[in-house]
C-alpha cells in the first residue's frame, strides 16, 4: 500500500468457464451481421459514437493531464493495431474533456507499468482537495492474484480517498501480468466490475458510497491505456437501487452518535477533561452501511482539521454489568465511560506493527474491550486521532470513521 495510490480470472466463485468450439447456424448469422455492421462503420474520429458506443481516442485534444502531472509523465502515441491511440501515463492522472458520465458502461484496456494502484475515477466533481468521485483500481504487484486486495473500489468523499474504510469492496482477482480488459457497469448506486471478458463480475459493489451522481472521468497511472469506450445509459439491466445493508437487522450495533467539535492533539494521552464543552455545537450522526459512522462526510480535506475527533452516545442498562464490545476505528482511539478512562488502542497502517486486523482497514475485527455499565444511563465518549500514520504532522487524506457493536444487548438500550 502506498500513500498515492491494487492469466485471466475465470469466475468470481472460482469455477472455470467452459469454452466450447464449433459454429452453429445462429452463431453464423450473428457473425455475418457483425461483419456487415463493421463494414458500414466510417473511420473513427477522436470521439465518435457508433450506435450507443462512444470511442474516445487517446489524443491531447480529448484528454489533459492533471495539475500534478509533469508534461513528460503523460504521452499520447500512435501504434499499429491501436486505431484510437495509446496513453502512456507514468504517474498521476489524465482528465477526459467534455464528457459528463452518470450511468452506463465504461470499458478500457490497461497495462500497469509499476507496483502501484492504477485505474479510473468516474463521476468526479470538484478540485482534488474537495473531490467527490468513485474509484476503481488494480493493486499491481507480483502477489496481486493471491492477495485479498488485488482489485478494489473506493469512494472519494470531500477530498478523502477511502481505500482503508471498506474492506468489503476489495477482493482477489486473476489479473494478467500484461494488458487487462476492464469493464465497469454503473447503474445508480450499484456497480459490477468485469475483468478480461469474464461472464461473472470480479467485483460487485452493492452500494456506491460517493456523494456525486454524475461527473467527469480520470485515468490514473502508472500504466498504459488503450481502447477506451463509453456506452451512456446502458446499464445491462443492473438495478439502480443499492443492495440491502448486510447488517441492517443487527440490533447490537450502536447507530446514533453525537459528533463534537474537533480539538488539537499534542501527542500525549487524551483525557476526559479534554472533551469539548457540551455547550458547543455537537451534531447527531448516524451509522450507515456496515454499521459504521463515515466521518469523511462531515469534513473536507481542504479544511485541514485539527487532529482529535469526539463522539458521544448514551446507553441505558437495567443493572450494573460489564458489557463486552467490538470497536471499529482508524488511527488511535481513547474510550471513556461516565467520565472514566476505560481503554486506548492503535490501528495505524504505518508502522505495520500497529495494523489491526483486517490489515489496517476499518472493521469490527479491529479490537474489543469491556465497558463497565452502571444501572441507569451511561455516557460513552470516544476520541480518535485519525490517520494512517502514527505521526500527527502528517495530514490524514484517507478513511475516517468509527463503529461500536455490543456482544449482547441483554438489559441494554441504545439511543434512538
Image (cartoon, rainbow, N blue to C red):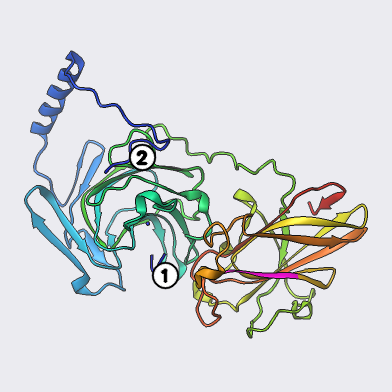
Picture quarter with the N terminus: bottom left
**Can you give x and y, in whole percent of width and height, for residue 85 in the image?**
14, 54
Q: Which residues are magenta?
A: 343-348
Crowdedness near tag 2: few (<14), some (14–19) or many (≥20) residues, C-alpha within 10 Å? some
Crowdedness near tag 1: few (<14), some (14–19) or many (≥20) residues, C-alpha within 10 Å? few
Residue 345 lies left or right of residue 357; in this view the side is: right
**Rendered residue at 79%/75% (across/down):** 279
Can residue 192 be seen here? The reply is no
Could you say whether the residue bearing mark 2 is in a helix, strand or loop? loop
Relative to 345, residue 112 above or below? above
**Can you give x and y, in whole percent of width and height, for residue 178 in the image?**
22, 51
Residue 122 lies left or right of residue 322; in this view the side is: left
Label whose residue precedes the other's in the sequence (2 or 1): 1
Relative to 72, residue 230 above or below? above
* 346 drawn magenta: yes
Predominant secondary structure, magenta span:
strand
Residue that mark 1 sits on: 3
Q: Which one is in front in this view, the residue at disc 2 or the one at disc 1?
A: 1
Can residue 204 be seen here? The reply is yes
Residue that mark 2 sits on: 233
Residue 395 lies left or right of residue 347; in this view the side is: left
**Rendered residue at 41%/47% (across/down):** 172
* 259 drawn magenta: no
Amino acid at each position: 500500500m502506498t500513500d498515492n495510490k491494487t492469466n485471466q480470472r475465470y469466475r468470481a466463485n472460482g469455477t472455470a468457464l467452459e469454452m466450447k468450439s464449433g459454429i452453429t447456424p445462429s452463431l453464423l448469422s450473428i457473425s455475418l451481421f457483425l461483419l456487415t455492421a463493421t463494414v458500414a462503420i466510417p473511420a473513427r474520429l477522436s470521439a465518435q459514437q457508433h450506435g450507443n458506443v462512444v470511442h474516445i481516442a487517446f489524443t491531447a485534444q480529448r484528454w489533459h493531464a492533471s495539475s500534478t502531472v509533469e508534461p513528460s509523465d503523460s504521452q499520447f502515441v500512435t501504434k499499429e493495431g491501436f486505431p484510437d491511440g495509446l496513453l502512456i501515463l507514468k504517474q498521476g492522472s489524465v482528465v477526459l474533456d467534455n464528457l459528463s458520465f452518470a450511468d452506463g458502461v465504461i470499458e478500457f484496456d490497461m497495462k500497469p507499468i509499476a507496483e502501484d494502484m492504477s485505474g479510473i475515477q468516474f463521476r468526479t466533481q470538484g478540485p482534488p482537495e474537495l473531490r467527490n468521485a468513485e474509484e476503481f483500481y488494480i493493486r499491481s504487484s507480483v502477489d496481486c492474484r493471491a492477495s485479498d486486495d488485488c482489485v478494489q473500489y473506493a469512494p472519494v468523499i470531500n477530498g478523502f480517498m477511502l481505500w482503508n474504510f471498506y474492506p468489503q469492496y476489495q477482493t482477489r482477482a486473476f489479473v494478467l501480468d500484461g494488458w487487462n480488459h476492464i469493464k465497469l457497469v454503473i447503474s445508480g448506486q450499484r456497480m459490477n466490475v468485469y475483468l478480461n471478458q469474464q461472464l461473472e463480475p470480479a467485483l460487485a459493489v452493492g452500494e456506491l458510497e460517493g456523494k456525486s451522481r454524475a461527473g467527469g472521468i480520470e485515468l490514473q497511472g502508472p500504466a498504459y491505456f488503450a481502447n477506451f469506450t463509453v456506452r451512456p445509459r446502458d446499464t445491462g439491466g443492473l438495478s439502480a437501487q443499492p443492495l440491502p445493508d448486510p447488517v441492517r437487522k443487527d440490533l447490537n450495533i450502536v447507530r446514533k452518535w453525537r459528533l463534537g467539535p474537533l480539538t488539537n492533539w499534542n501527542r500525549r494521552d487524551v483525557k476526559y477533561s479534554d472533551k469539548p464543552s457540551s455547550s458547543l455545537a455537537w451534531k447527531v450522526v448516524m451509522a450507515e452501511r456496515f454499521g459504521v459512522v463515515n466521518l469523511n462526510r462531515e469534513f473536507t480535506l481542504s479544511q485541514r482539521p485539527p487532529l482529535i475527533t469526539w463522539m458521544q452516545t448514551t446507553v441505558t442498562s437495567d443493572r450494573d454489568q460489564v458489557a463486552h464490545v467490538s470497536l471499529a476505528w482508524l488511527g488511535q482511539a481513547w474510550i471513556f465511560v461516565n467520565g472514566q478512562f476505560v481503554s486506548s488502542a492503535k490501528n495505524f497502517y504505518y508502522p505495520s506493527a500497529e495494523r489491526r486486523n483486517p490489515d489496517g482497514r476499518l472493521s469490527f475485527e479491529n479490537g474489543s474491550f469491556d465497558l463497565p455499565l452502571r444501572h441507569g444511563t451511561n455516557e460513552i465518549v470516544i476520541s480518535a486521532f485519525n490517520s494512517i500514520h502514527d505521526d500527527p504532522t502528517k495530514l490524514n487524506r484517507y478513511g475516517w470513521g468509527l463503529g461500536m457493536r455490543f456482544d449482547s444487548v441483554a438489559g441494554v438500550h441504545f439511543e434512538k
